[in-house]
Image (cartoon, rainbow, N blue to C red):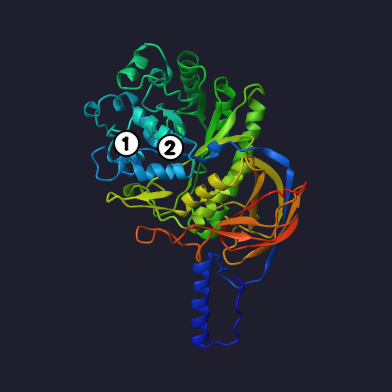
């Protein structure tokens, strides 16, 4: 939107300007910057014929757990609920999982997994016991066991996602974990395969991904956990199902001392049967520039673990990283309120930044799980009256899962940077962050750009190397007038994804990225050979 400059301070003209800006904003979907500061310029170079690696869609995974109101009643309301449901699961929540093409879901946690005994959650619902959930799970209404293994697999089938099950290491046993795999994956008439058939599922679920505990550093030393991993892995993989992929709990929590020693010890002593080591990334900030800088904290942690894997794990044992819990955590989210928090536009920019990190490290980070999609540090918020709205974090997922590609392209971004707050510990955060990908189905380039500047638009010169584009392209962007803009039950569409067209694309062209925004430019190749 072209800025209007007035040389008078009269109230009438200022009012007219305000109304004109609002009308233009509402009708065109184009946002003006929040400030009138100095112009910033940038250069983005995209090497269209140079791949940086294949992006695994599993980086857009989700997690559901019985913590706060995530599972009960966020997803599970029961068959008899007045809220529209499919076999007890909220229909609107299922549709939201599908809308972002959820590729994989982690369950039963998270913290609840270390108290969860799967046998309590199978069989006739009226015979399932209700059990307690200690620790952070106290915010949950106990484990009702109405949503168990069969219901979880039904849910995954409904949304078209793979299952990732986290076995109980805290209060469970390796035998219990092996029996669970037998229940899920085995054919024939062994005890637990026969039990699955008895409860109505003749065919195996074929669950590929299994976690050996969750945040096990709260239960073990690095040395004792290494022994546990070997014990669990041996029976889970060699006796129950040789085809599964196993995930060990890594450590990168800055509040816990000894992350390097933990990861080093586990990788050195327990790598034989492992396929993944996990990192959990929660960032506890509320100020805008701190929040949007957080993804850059994850990069050195990933690089550090990558080097450790290369040093300690034999090359023929390909071991990858999963960031199977990640989120921004604001101070208002407490255990007693079910970890509910208001998610705003800046949280959407944070999520987009995490996707860019996963893209840049796609050779080693092949799975990630946002925690949690529903009600707890949420991307989706529901209530018991049947209401639902989505947060900007969900909208970031919608942008990237639907409108970016699976081949990461090499690119360069030259732009000014800012110094993050000392407590964040990130130097020189670039105002623009670009991730270019190739959409294999149609050969289009998806150019995703975050403008982190809180007040200023940034004009970038975009240089497409070895790619002749059509002049006209589709623009999709996430933005609002304020970085604190948020949706709620009364105004569920205050922050939305908007679309427009741009008709001046070339091998070299300029584009203005609005302040505090995420923009995806989808560029088609020209048909002319």
Front-most of residues 519 and 214: 519
**Few, some or many C-alpha atoms within 10 Å of disc 1 (few <14, some 14-19, many ≥20)?**
some
Front-most of residues 360 and 194: 194
Q: Quadrant of the N terminus?
A: bottom right
**Which residue sits at x=42%, y=45%?**
96
Sequence-first disc among 2 and 1: 1
Front-most of residues 519 and 182: 519
Residue 358: % across, % down: 59, 42
Q: Quadrant of residue 303?
A: top right
Whether residue 25 is visible, yes or no, is yes
Q: Which mark is residue 40?
A: none
Front-most of residues 397 and 26: 26
Residue 235: % across, % down: 46, 16
Q: Element type at marker 2? A: helix
Tag 2 residue: 159
Tag 1 residue: 134
Q: Element type at marker 1? A: loop
Residue 338: % across, % down: 34, 47
The correct choice, above or below, for 390 with respect to 206 in the image is: below
Q: Residue furthest top?
A: 189
Tell whether 39 sits left or right of 199. right
Q: CA distance from mark 2 to mark 1?
A: 30 Å
């Amino acid at each position: 939107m072209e800025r209007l400059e007035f040389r008078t301070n009269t109230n009438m003209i200022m009012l007219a300007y305000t109304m004109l800006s609002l009308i233009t904003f509402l009708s065109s979907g184009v946002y003006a910057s929040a400030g009138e500061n100095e112009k910033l310029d940038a250069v983005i170079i995209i090497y269209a014929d140079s791949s940086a690696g294949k992006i695994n869609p599993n980086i857009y995974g989700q997690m559901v757990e019985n913590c706060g109101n995530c599972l009960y009643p966020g997803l599970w309301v029961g068959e008899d609920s007045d809220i529209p449901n499919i076999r007890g699961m909220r229909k609107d929540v299922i549709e939201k999982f599908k809308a972002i093409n959820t590729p994989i879901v982690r369950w039963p946690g998270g913290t609840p997994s270390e108290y969860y005994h799967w046998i309590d959650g199978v069989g006739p619902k009226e015979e399932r016991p209700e059990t307690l959930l200690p620790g952070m799970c106290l915010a949950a209404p106990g484990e009702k066991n109405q949503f168990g293994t069969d219901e979880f697999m039904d849910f995954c089938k409904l949304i078209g996602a793979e299952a990732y099950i986290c076995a109980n290491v805290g209060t469970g046993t390796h035998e219990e974990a092996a029996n669970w795999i037998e229940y899920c994956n085995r054919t024939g008439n062994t005890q637990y395969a026969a039990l699955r058939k008895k409860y109505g599922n003749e065919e195996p679920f074929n669950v590929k991904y299994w976690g050996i505990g969750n945040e096990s550093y709260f239960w073990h030393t690095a040395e004792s956990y290494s022994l546990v991993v070997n014990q669990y892995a041996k029976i889970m993989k060699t006796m129950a199902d040789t085809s599964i992929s196993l995930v060990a709990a890594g450590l990168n929590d800055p509040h816990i001392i000894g992350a390097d020693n933990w990861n080093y010890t586990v990788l050195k002593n327990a790598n034989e049967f492992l396929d993944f080591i996990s990192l959990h990334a929660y960032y506890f900030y509320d100020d805008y520039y701190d929040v949007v800088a957080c993804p850059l904290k994850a990069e050195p942690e990933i690089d550090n673990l990558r080097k450790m894997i290369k040093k300690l794990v034999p090359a023929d044992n390909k071991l990858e990283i999963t960031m199977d819990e990640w989120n921004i955590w604001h101070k208002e989210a407490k255990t007693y309120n079910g970890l509910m928090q208001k998610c705003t536009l800046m949280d959407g920019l944070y999520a987009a930044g995490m996707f860019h990190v996963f893209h840049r490290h796609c050779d080693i980070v092949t799975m990630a799980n946002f925690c949690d999609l529903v009600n707890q540090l949420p991307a989706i918020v529901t209530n018991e009256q049947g209401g639902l709205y989505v947060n900007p974090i969900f909208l970031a997922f919608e942008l990237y899962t639907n409108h970016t590609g699976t081949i990461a392209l090499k690119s360069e971004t030259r732009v000014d940077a800012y110094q993050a707050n000392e407590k964040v510990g990130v130097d020189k955060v670039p105002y623009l962050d670009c991730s270019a990908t190739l959409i294999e189905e149609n050969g289009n380039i998806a150019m995703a750009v975050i403008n982190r500047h809180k007040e200023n638009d940034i004009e970038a010169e975009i240089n497409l190397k070895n790619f002749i584009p059509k002049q006209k392209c589709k623009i999709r962007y996430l933005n609002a007038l304020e970085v604190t803009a948020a949706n709620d039950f009364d105004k569920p569409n205050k922050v939305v994804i908007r679309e427009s067209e741009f008709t001046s694309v070339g091998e070299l062209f300029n584009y203005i990225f609005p302040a505090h925004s995420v923009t995806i430019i989808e560029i088609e190749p020209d048909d002319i050979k």
